[in-house]
Structure formats: structure tokens, C-alpha cells
Image (tube, rainbow, N blue to C red):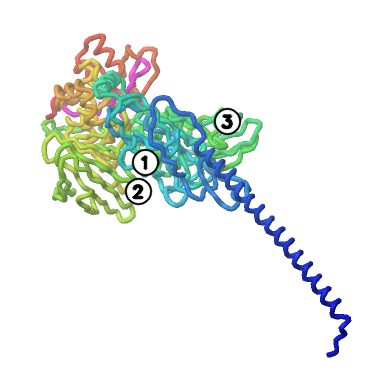
């Protein structure tokens, strides 16, 4: 190819210039790119530092320190990993790295709680004493609570958070995280429970222990913070206080919190299917209620709750039925009731097992626990002692030369495979089946744990040494006389720091298929049962105590001879559903009650040589009532109305038939009546006879 020599020099210059320009453009581009990269890295680093500082602020900012002493060791680890909630839960993701704030309002609104029930307002413990503490939270948020998965519900130590508590008891999940939610799932509107053990430190003093409910990896649950004031002092001081407090009957083992809020909601109970109810003991009742919105704003009918004063010592209504969402909530609803409209609620309830006059009380609530003013419910319920197969004559037995009966008292139950019964004894004990065949032996203070599979109906009993399974009930008996068992998993608090979980002689674990519950039952002789009765105080006049004991013995004998109330699974419950029985600790606190039992051994009320039923109650309005006036049916000649002068100017408390406890107390203390005179006054034409 021919090439013009004159052109080549110009072509070389042009190429050189182009190459130079390309090198310049490349350098400029690289410089710009490097600037962008460096700026981007600086931005990321700055965002990281800012977010880290923010997280540090949330987790270490000063919180209100409770008065008194608190735990010492602080755990600086975060509660969660990968959290998306910004109150004390450290997290890191690319959005925070870029400084982009994520919205957590939905999470915060989803998790809300209110403290509804707890074992005690305050605790008084001796150094080294350990108690089981229970607290119930109502789920008032939107999200369901669970005790498993990545967002399980639990409580953490608080003020300051994540510290190791000096009250850490056995069985804590972690040193700063006592326990998870007891139930597998708690939906909105239901109650969930947390149970954990508190062990008093050796150092005496006043403490305030704080905890906070949390959804793991999610949030501190709004409304879930609570404090427990705890006094730790020697047993001598606690014993003195307990004796002073024994002048009163403790009718409630749990402290109930009425979490309903005031509102401008107005309503009226316009319709009810029954103005009053007459029922047999244990009868299932249907009720329909219609509420009119008489206010100026619409409201969402949430359902009914039972007022605090109408709850039993286990936190449930005496009318509780298994279909209720919880022990204090008969029914729930989500109906919107507009101004002037009527909303209806249907519910089932179960008549109490004891004859008497009761009031079914409910309150209407709307829009997350706001009371509807004017929409209260109160329906009188008259329960007779009639049950299927029961002896309606009122007589108990005709044989006055019987041996001392052995009673079975229902103490507590579990209804979930996740729950366990733990017990031990101060002396060697053994486990047998129902027929008495030996299954295992245990040394003194050796503990055992029992769980029940409600699907396979298999009971598993185990500890570090053994593991046994049974398809039937098991019995724990002392090898020696005067054995006392401690139910470690039971909490029956009493003032002065007592936990009434100690019971004599024998413990049975028995499944009741009619209720789907595994019951812990105390089997013991009649007189040992009466030693643990807490129907009167230790400082009452001795003859008054004796009159109560003789009536209580007769009542227990009636149910021993007529075992229909609890379908034959046990004789009576340990609560005021029958007679308040608190076991061995009550013996220790009330030695004069034990004295009264021993001095009236085997004595019962008889009418024409028959042992008869002897109802008693709190106080009257100045006069008792006949059997037929309250329970209907044929009158019983020993139960006729009498004047009760020490009840003057009082209102009726109880069914009003038989002996008024308040009036009997007055006659014993002021008039000097002995127990036979007291009994003969309230039970016409009777004798006090020795049965065994």
C-alpha cells in the first residue's frame, strides 16, 4: 500500500493527542469513582457509629432505681439477636447501617399486656427461704404469645436490666431471665402465667425486685413491668407476725388487679334470659344478656369480666365453666354496638357445688378493658344440695360406732402436659400404685417430679435416680408415722411469708377424666384433716373453735358418706368451695385449733340418733333461715330460724341456714356459752354424740 509521507507525521500527532485525552479522562473518572466510594464508606461508617451510639443509649441510659437493695451482677449481653425493636434490644442490619430508621410502631402495638393476678403484693421471707411466685398477664395486644419459637414470651430482670438477681431460685431459665410463659399459646384477651422460684439471700433487709415481660427478639411488652417488695428477716420475727395475722381468715391466695379503665362508654342491661336462677349443685346453666348502647359513641363489645370481689382464692369465679376463655372471663365478643343498638352475649356457667345463696356478678367491657358504665349484671343463684345419687334426707349415717373415716382432699391440679408436680418429704417415703404394690422408695428430702401426658394418659415420675411410668394413679406414703410432704410446685401464700404447701400422711396423683385434670390429692384421717382447717383463728374463744370443729367434722362426714360432689375423685376441695383447709402449716400457726380437734375427737351433731347435715355461714341480718326458705324442698326439723343478736344491723353474708359464725363467736366470748350450748342453739333438738 502506498503511504504519503507527508500525512504520517500528522497522524502520529493526532493519535498521541487522543491517547493523552483518554488517559486524562480515565484518571478523572477514577478520581471521581474513588471519591464516590470513599464518601460512601464514610457515610456507612458514620451511620454505623450513630446507630451504635443510639443502641448504647437505649441499653445503658439511667433507669429509675427502686428503693432498697437490688442485684449486683450486670449482664451486658443483649436480650436478642437480629431484633427490630429499638428499646434496649441491640440490632444491626443494612438499613440501620445506611441510617434508615425502620418503623416499629406495628410491633409495639402488637405486644401489650396488663398485670391481672399475682401471688402476693409483697413477700416476707426468712434468709434462704424459697417460694414459688406466680403472676398472670392479660394479653391486650394483637399478637399471640407463645412459650417457644424465636419470639417466645418470658420475663427479664429489670432496673437495671439483664442483671443477675440475688433472689435467683432453682429452675430459672437464665440468671437474668427467670421463666418463660407457662402456656403454649395465649391469644389476645386471654391470661398467660409466668411461674418462677424466688430464694431469699442470707442478708436481711428490705428489697424491691423488678421484672419486665418481653417478646424475645421483638420487644419489651408495654404494661409488662412489675415489682415485688420483699422483706428478708429472721423466722422469729416472721412467726410473731404470722400469729398476729392468724386472727383473720385469709379468703384469697392471689392478689387480683382490676385493670379495667374508666371511659365515656354508657350502656344498660336491657334483656336477660333469667332474673333469678334455682339450680342443683353442679348444674350447667345457660344465660343470655342484651346490652343497649345508651351513650353518644359506638363501642366494640369485648365481653364480660367477673369483678375482683366475686373471684375465689384461685382467681376464678365460683361459676367458672371450662368453655370460658379464662377463670374471670365468661365470654368474649368482637361485636360493634352503635349508639341506640343492642348487642347480645351468650354464656354458660356452672352452679356451685355447695348448697347456698350466691350472686352471679359480671361487668361489660369494651375496646380493650374499658368498663361500660351502667352495664353491670347481678343475678341471684339459689343452689340446693340435690345432686344425682345424693341422699336428700339430710341425714348422714345411722351407725354411731364407726371407725375414723379417711378423707381425700383435692389440693391442686394441672391440665397441661407442660406442667409438673414436684414433691418431697421430711422423712423416707415410698411410691405405690392404687392397689398398694410398691413401685419405688425415696430417702428423706429426695425430690421427685411427675408429668402427665394428656394424649397417651401416661404418668411419668422421675428424678436423678429413677424414671417410672404408670397408666394409673400413684400414691406417695411415708414409711414412718407423722410424715409431712411438701408440694414444691404448689404456691398457697399466707401472710408472713408462709407457703401452705405442706400436707400430712399421703399424696395421690389421680387423673379425673370428667374434667381432664391431673389432681394432687391429700389422703389422711378425719382428725388430721381437721387439724389443718383454717375456718377460724387461733385467738378465738376455745368453745367457739370447738363449735366450728364439730360442725366441720359433721360436714366432712356428710361428704364422706355421699361422695357425689366431685364424682368420686375426692371427698372435698381444700378451698372455701367446701371448708378452708391449709394443711400442716395451719397446725403450726393455730395450736388451739388442734387442741379443739383433740378435745372433741369423733364428736358430731345428731338428731334422733342420726348424724345430720350442719350448714354454717358468716353472719346473718339478725335471724337465720329455715332449710326450705333457702334451698326449697322439705324442711329439716333441726334447721329452723333463730334470732342472732350479735348479727344485729348487719347484712346477710352466706346462705343464712344453721349456725352464724359471727353470732356464735359473740355468745362464746361475751356470754360464756360452751360449744354444746352454741350448737344446740342453732341446730334445734340435736345432741352432740361421739361417733368414734
Q: Is residue 619 magenta?
A: yes
Q: Quadrant of residue 13?
A: bottom right
Residue at position x 50%, y 32% from top?
Answer: 62
Helix, strand or loop status at disc 2: loop
- Cβ–Cβ below 8 Å for labels 3 and 1? no
Q: Is the stretch drawn in magenta largely helix, strand or loop? A: loop
Mark identifier at residue 268: 3
In which quadrant of the rendered image does the N terminus lie? bottom right
Q: Position of residue 645 (x, y in %)?
A: 32, 11
| Foreground residue among 556 and 388 | 556
Residue 258 as seen in the image, left or right of residue 448: right
Q: Secondary structure at mark 1?
A: loop
Residue 416 location in percent, x, y?
A: 35, 47
How far from the left and from the top, in percent, is residue 228?
40, 30
| Magenta stretch encompasses residue 151 | no
Precedes in sequence: disc 3 or disc 1: 1
User: Which residue in the rendered view is the most extreme toward the bottom?
Assistant: 1
Between the residue at mark 1 and the residue at mark 2, the CA separation in whole angstroms equals 22 Å
Task: Judge by depth and name the residue closer to the eye, 377 or 622.
Answer: 377
Which disc, if any, is residue 418?
Answer: 2
Please identify, in this view, whether the residue under mark 1 or under mark 2 is nearer the observer: 1
Mark seen at residue 175: 1
Amino acid at each position: 500500500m502506498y503511504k504519503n509521507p507527508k500525512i504520517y507525521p500528522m497522524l502520529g500527532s493526532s493519535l498521541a493527542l487522543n491517547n493523552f485525552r483518554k488517559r486524562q479522562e480515565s484518571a478523572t473518572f477514577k478520581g471521581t469513582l474513588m471519591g464516590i466510594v470513599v464518601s460512601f464508606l464514610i457515610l456507612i461508617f458514620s451511620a454505623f457509629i450513630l446507630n451504635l451510639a443510639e443502641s448504647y443509649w437505649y441499653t445503658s441510659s439511667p433507669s429509675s432505681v427502686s428503693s432498697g437493695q437490688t442485684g449486683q451482677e450486670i449482664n451486658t449481653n443483649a436480650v436478642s439477636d437480629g431484633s427490630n425493636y429499638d428499646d434496649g434490644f441491640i440490632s444491626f442490619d443494612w438499613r440501620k447501617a445506611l441510617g434508615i430508621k425502620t418503623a416499629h410502631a406495628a410491633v409495639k402495638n402488637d405486644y401489650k399486656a396488663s398485670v391481672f393476678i399475682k401471688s402476693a403484693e409483697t413477700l416476707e421471707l426468712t434468709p434462704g427461704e424459697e417460694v414459688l411466685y406466680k403472676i398472670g398477664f392479660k394479653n391486650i395486644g394483637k399478637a399471640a404469645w407463645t412459650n417457644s419459637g424465636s419470639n417466645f414470651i418470658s420475663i427479664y430482670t429489670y432496673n437495671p436490666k439483664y442483671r443477675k438477681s440475688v433472689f435467683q431460685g432453682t429452675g430459672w431459665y437464665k440468671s437474668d431471665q427467670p421463666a418463660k410463659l407457662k402456656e403454649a399459646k395465649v391469644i389476645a384477651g386471654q391470661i398467660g402465667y409466668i411461674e418462677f422460684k424466688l430464694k431469699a439471700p442470707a442478708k436481711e433487709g428490705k428489697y424491691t425486685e423488678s421484672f419486665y415481660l418481653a417478646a424475645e427478639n421483638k420487644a419489651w411488652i408495654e404494661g409488662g413491668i412489675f415489682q415485688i417488695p420483699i422483706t428478708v428477716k429472721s423466722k422469729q420475727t416472721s412467726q410473731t407476725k404470722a400469729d398476729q395475722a392468724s386472727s383473720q381468715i385469709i379468703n384469697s391466695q392471689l392478689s387480683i388487679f382490676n385493670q379495667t379503665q374508666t371511659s365515656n362508654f354508657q350502656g344498660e342491661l336491657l334483656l336477660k334470659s333469667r332474673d333469678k336462677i334455682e339450680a342443683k349443685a353442679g348444674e350447667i346453666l345457660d344465660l343470655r344478656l342484651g346490652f343497649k348502647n345508651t351513650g353518644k359513641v359506638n363501642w366494640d363489645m369485648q365481653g364480660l369480666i367477673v369483678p375482683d370481689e366475686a373471684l375465689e382464692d384461685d382467681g376464678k369465679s365460683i361459676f367458672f365453666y371450662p368453655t370460658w376463655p379464662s377463670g374471670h372471663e365468661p365470654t368474649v365478643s368482637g361485636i360493634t354496638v352503635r349508639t341506640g343498638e343492642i348487642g347480645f352475649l351468650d354464656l354458660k356457667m356452672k352452679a356451685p357445688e355447695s348448697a347456698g345463696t350466691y350472686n352471679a356478678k359480671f361487668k361489660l367491657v369494651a375496646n380493650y378493658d374499658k368498663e361500660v358504665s351502667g352495664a353491670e349484671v347481678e343475678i341471684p343463684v339459689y343452689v340446693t344440695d340435690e345432686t344425682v345419687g345424693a341422699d336428700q334426707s339430710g341425714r348422714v349415717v345411722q351407725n354411731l360406732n364407726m371407725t375414723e373415716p379417711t378423707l381425700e382432699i383435692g389440693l391442686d391440679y394441672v391440665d397441661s402436659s407442660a406442667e409438673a408436680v414436684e414433691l418431697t418429704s421430711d422423712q423416707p417415703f415410698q411410691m405405690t400404685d392404687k392397689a398398694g404394690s410398691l413401685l419405688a422408695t425415696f430417702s428423706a428430702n429426695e425430690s421427685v417430679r411427675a408429668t402427665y401426658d394428656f394424649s397417651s394418659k401416661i404418668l411419668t415420675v422421675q428424678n436423678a435416680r429413677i424414671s417410672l411410668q404408670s397408666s394409673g394413679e400413684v400414691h406417695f406414703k411415708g414409711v414412718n408415722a407423722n410424715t409431712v410432704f411438701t408440694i414444691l410446685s404448689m404456691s398457697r401464700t399466707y401472710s408472713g411469708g408462709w407457703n401452705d404447701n405442706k400436707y400430712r400422711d399421703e399424696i395421690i396423683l389421680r387423673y379425673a377424666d370428667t374434667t381432664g385434670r391431673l389432681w394432687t390429692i391429700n389422703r389422711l384421717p378425719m382428725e388430721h384433716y381437721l387439724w389443718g382447717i383454717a375456718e377460724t383463728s387461733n385467738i378465738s374463744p376455745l368453745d367457739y373453735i370447738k363449735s366450728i370443729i364439730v360442725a366441720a367434722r359433721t360436714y366432712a362426714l356428710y361428704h364422706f358418706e355421699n361422695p357425689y360432689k366431685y364424682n368420686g375423685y375426692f371427698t372435698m376441695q381444700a378451698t372455701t368451695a367446701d371448708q378452708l383447709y391449709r394443711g400442716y402449716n395451719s397446725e403450726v400457726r393455730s395450736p388451739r385449733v388442734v387442741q379443739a380437734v383433740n378435745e372433741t375427737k369423733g364428736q358430731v351433731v345428731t338428731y334422733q340418733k342420726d348424724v345430720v347435715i350442719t350448714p354454717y355461714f358468716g353472719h346473718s341480718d339478725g335471724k337465720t333461715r329455715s332449710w326450705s326458705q333457702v334451698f326449697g324442698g322439705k324442711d329439716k326439723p333441726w334447721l329452723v330460724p333463730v334470732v342472732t343478736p350479735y348479727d344485729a344491723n348487719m347484712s346477710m353474708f352466706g346462705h343464712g341456714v344453721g349456725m352464724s359464725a359471727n353470732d356464735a363467736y359473740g355468745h362464746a366470748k361475751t356470754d360464756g356459752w360452751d360449744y354444746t350450748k352454741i350448737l344446740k342453739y342453732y341446730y334445734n333438738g340435736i345432741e352432740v354424740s361421739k361417733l368414734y
